[in-house]
Image (tube, helix red, strand yellow):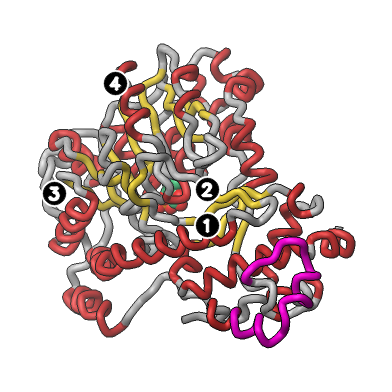
Amino acid sequence: MYGRRYSRRKFVKQNTKAGIGIMLTVGATPSIFACSSNVSGKPAILGGSPVHSGEWAKWPIWNPETDEKKVIEVLRSGIWSRAKLVTEFEQEWAKTIGAKRSLAVVNGTNALIAAMVQAGIGGGDEVIVSSYTFIASAASILATGAIPVFVDSDPKTFQIDTSKIEKKITSRTAAIMPVHILGLPANMPVIMQIAEKHNLVVIEDACQGWLAEIDHKKVGTFGKAGCFSFQNSKNMAIGEGGAIVSDDDDFMDRCYSYHNYGNPYGTAVGTVGSGTVIAGTKLRITEYQAAIGLAQLKRLEQETQTRGENATYLKSMIKEIPGIIPYVLHDNVTRAAFHLFPFKYGKEGFNGLSRETFLKALNAEGINCSGGYSPLNKMPYLNNAFQSKNYKLMYPPEMLDFNTYLERNQCPVTDRLCDEEGVWIYQNLLLGEKSDMDDIAGAIEKIQKHSYTIKKELE
Ligand SMILES: Cc1ncc(COP(=O)(O)O)c(C=O)c1O
């Protein structure tokens, strides 16, 4: 339990005490929140009491009693570089995801780079990628020497719009990188059909998709490889860390070699003169990272269950609020990971109140939220890569003309999600009780009901 509670029972009690009539004058729509004083009272951004005044679940969760034994053993053993625990973590992760093999690496970004490089992607190629995503998806493509080609988003699911993929395929297209953004699955069966038709490699950016499923199959297992992140904010947090999963033994042997200087598959850490076989780098994680990962992995299933239940409940609570359009999952999704709980904000439902002020008002009510990403398809890093020596050697000048590139990569739905509509509630809030979800819904409704006054006073 975190913070002040507004359970249904408490609402009903307060309703009876305070009298429904008084509270209904606040707004046109009666609701279960209408009679709780700090829900119907003055908005916190205008000096009222916040709906949620307590703490949310601290992230990452760490339980010294159950989690520290292995970590301390590792620290005392002095075996810190890759050894048995990393292998154990990889086996556990592969089992959890339902993949034949897994390789742990330093982070999700490098998981993507390693997977693409070993799938044969490099200079001269184009990689089709979701546009509503974190910079790492695009940065990893550039790191291979390929050019990212952005596809617009589906406005309901926030995922790559599969109906727009084929229009972006050219003779240079080598791969598709769908991103399961926010932990909501991209429509993999359709993406795999397109990839097969055009003979393209699929590398899934599942860096936010731990345990998410389509038709009971985990995301990350549809394409040639799936890549995960275990960075501090992630639902499966190690601090830094990542993993590649795949069923392709030969490919995974090469990924292993690549992450260990290019030495042959299975070469033990510390071996010298083993006869390096491929051009590699060093991406190994440590034993103490694996020990932390094994501890976190024990909680992942239950936490994913809780996030899913709370997200479904919260969605049901806010879907009727004017101006709020919650996420939609593709019909084939059997589980989402909810790295974030997203909804679209329409200021027309809030008397024209800007998203910026709405976010400030919601944060003031004690609900940690943000407006999310900025459009990745038009930032200067792209032109910076295009003007580099390597890109000039690998591509004809017309492909590196930034204005032409911008024209070809327009994504108006993603622009709107980024600039006007997207609102995220952070994953740790979804680990609370049902009454915490009531607080979130109550806070949104409170702002909606007072939107005219908030706008008048603050905008
Ligand atoms: C969608 C997506 N792709 C890739 C990454 C990269 O992961 P990492 O931060 O572990 O490098 C992240 C993590 O932030 C992400 O959210």
Residue corresponding to mark 4: 196
Q: How many marks?
A: 4
Q: Secondary structure at mark 3?
A: loop
User: Residue 20: which quarter of the image?
Assistant: bottom right
Q: What x and y, as percent, mark residue 168? A: 48, 19
Front tag of 3 and 4: 4
Front tag of 2 and 3: 2
User: Residue 277: which quarter of the image?
Assistant: top left
The front one of 425 and 172 is 425
Q: Secondary structure at mark 4?
A: helix
Q: CA distance from mark 1 to mark 3?
A: 56 Å
Residue 385 is a magenta residue:
no
Q: Are marks 2 and 4 in contact (CB under 8 Å)?
A: no
Q: Amino acid at mark 3?
A: Val
Q: Earlier in the sequence, mark 2 or mark 1?
A: 1
Please tell me which residue is depicted at 78% across the width and 75% down the height of the picture. 42
Q: Amino acid at mark 2?
A: Tyr
